[in-house]
Image (cartoon, rainbow, N blue to C red):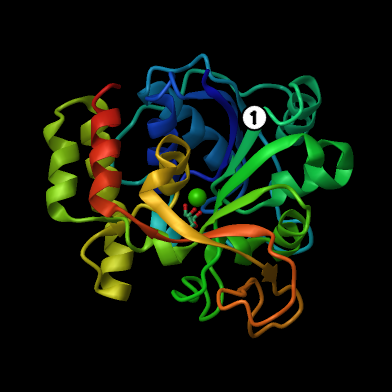
């Protein structure tokens, strides 16, 4: 029985790989829809890139919805310096022919959670949490119907990647993150602490390219482009595949480990805005609200990813 999910995303090369991994795993994952949000690049581009990825996977049957074009209470901050002007720099992929759905992404999220039996839809946010938080605010009744939220965002030991204190997805819309982390929905968080251990080394990227398929070659080209930011900044061995950790967790949770702890979001201090204050050492009496992942079996992750990408 596949798990029903909605992928909320701001593609972004790593979002693209997360989407491809999900679409390559139809026995385990049913993608009810993909909702685009402004983040790495503005909404028109994230909504376009999501469709480019569906077409690359040969899955134009998956409905794609455009969502919020700006954070709840702040100006949009984008990351072209990481992902390039298009948000999907690297491969030269054709413009999409499939069209966007007319329904707004927030309405799709609300309608789907109300239509599906309670506890049967997992939300997989891979970008700023604007769409999710807007849906929860507009329709509080849907929160208890969510099976689980498995998101990429935040950091504790790794601290920030867009400011000294904050990870990008949370930093772009901290008010939205505060709503989601405080919603009471079951939450699994993939922070930089674990995604910085999912590095596409040269050997791993060569394995993608060696698939020889349009998908394998496109993923290798995305990584060739996407890795230069992290290699320069962190001196790391390769690109951290942040968002695919979310999809891989749905397929093989045994590859990951973490702690069920309290995580709060800084929404007022300019100095630490967007910081995920994770009580990893349980020094407060604040109630645990998230499974905060710290470790993964990196080679197991890449073996899974490469094997699945080969199917497309
Ligand atoms: O900080 C990494 C996150 O920000 C990833 O989701 C990446 O795609 C960007 O959205
Ligand atoms: Ca993303």
Q: Is residue 236 left or right of residue 40?
A: left
Q: Between residues 289 and 57, which one lies in front from this camera angle?
A: 289
Mark 1 Cα-neighbour bin, 10 Å: few <14, some 14–19, many ≥20 = many
Q: Position of residue 305 (x, y in %)?
A: 29, 38
* Residue furthest bottom as drawn: 271
Q: Is residue 40 visible?
A: yes
Compared with 260, 5 (above or below) is above
Name the spot of residue 18 as percent of width and height, x first.
Answer: 42, 40
Residue 251 in the image: x percent, y percent? 42, 35
The residue at label 1 has a CB less than 8 Å from ligand 2: no
Left or right of 146 in this view: 281: left
Q: Is residue 243 left or right of residue 140?
A: left
Q: Foreground: 92 or 276?
A: 276
Query: In percent of the image, x 49 and y 62: which residue is there?
Result: 191
Image vertical order of residue 297 relative to residue 93, above or below:
below
Q: Quadrant of residue 32?
A: top right
Quarter of the C terminus within the rendering: top left
The residue located at (24%, 36%) in the rendering is 306
Q: Residue at x 23, y 26 (%)?
A: 310
Residue 275, position as x, y percentages in the image:
62, 74
Query: Please, what secondary structure does the residue beneath circle 1 have?
Result: strand
Q: Residue at x 62, y 35 (%)?
A: 122
Q: Quadrant of residue 266?
A: bottom right
Q: What residue did someone put label 1 on?
A: 65
């Amino acid at each position: 029985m596949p798990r029903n999910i909605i992928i909320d995303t701001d593609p972004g090369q790593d979002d693209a790989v997360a989407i491809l991994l999900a679409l390559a795993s139809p026995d385990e994952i049913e993608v009810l829809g993909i909702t685009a949000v402004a983040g790495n690049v503005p909404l028109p581009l994230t909504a376009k890139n999501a469709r480019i990825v569906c077409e690359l996977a040969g899955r134009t049957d998956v409905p794609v919805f455009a969502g919020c074009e700006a954070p709840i209470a702040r100006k949009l901050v984008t990351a072209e310096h990481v992902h390039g002007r298009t948000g999907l720099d690297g491969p030269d992929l054709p413009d999409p022919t499939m069209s966007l759905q007319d329904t707004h992404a927030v309405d799709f999220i609300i309608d789907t959670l109300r239509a599906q039996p309670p506890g049967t839809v997992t939300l997989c946010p891979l970008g700023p949490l604007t769409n999710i938080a807007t849906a929860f605010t507009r329709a509080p009744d849907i929160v208890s119907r969510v099976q689980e939220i498995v998101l990429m965002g935040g950091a504790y030991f790794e601290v920030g990647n867009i400011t000294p204190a904050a990870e990008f997805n949370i930093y772009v819309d901290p008010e939205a993150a505060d709503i989601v982390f405080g919603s009471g929905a079951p939450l699994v968080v993939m922070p930089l602490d674990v995604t910085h251990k999912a590095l596409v080394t040269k050997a791993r990227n060569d394995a993608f390219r060696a698939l020889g398929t349009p998908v394998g070659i496109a993923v290798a080209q995305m990584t060739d482009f996407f890795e230069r930011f992290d290699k320069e900044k962190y001196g790391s061995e390769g690109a951290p595949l942040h968002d695919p950790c979310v999809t891989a967790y749905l397929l093989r949770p045994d590859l990951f480990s973490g702690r069920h702890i309290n995580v709060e979001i800084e929404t007022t201090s300019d100095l630490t805005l967007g910081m995920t204050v994770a009580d990893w050492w349980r020094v407060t009496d604040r109630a645990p609200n998230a499974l905060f992942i710290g470790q993964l079996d990196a080679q197991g992750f890449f073996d899974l990813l490469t094997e699945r990408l080969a199917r497309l």
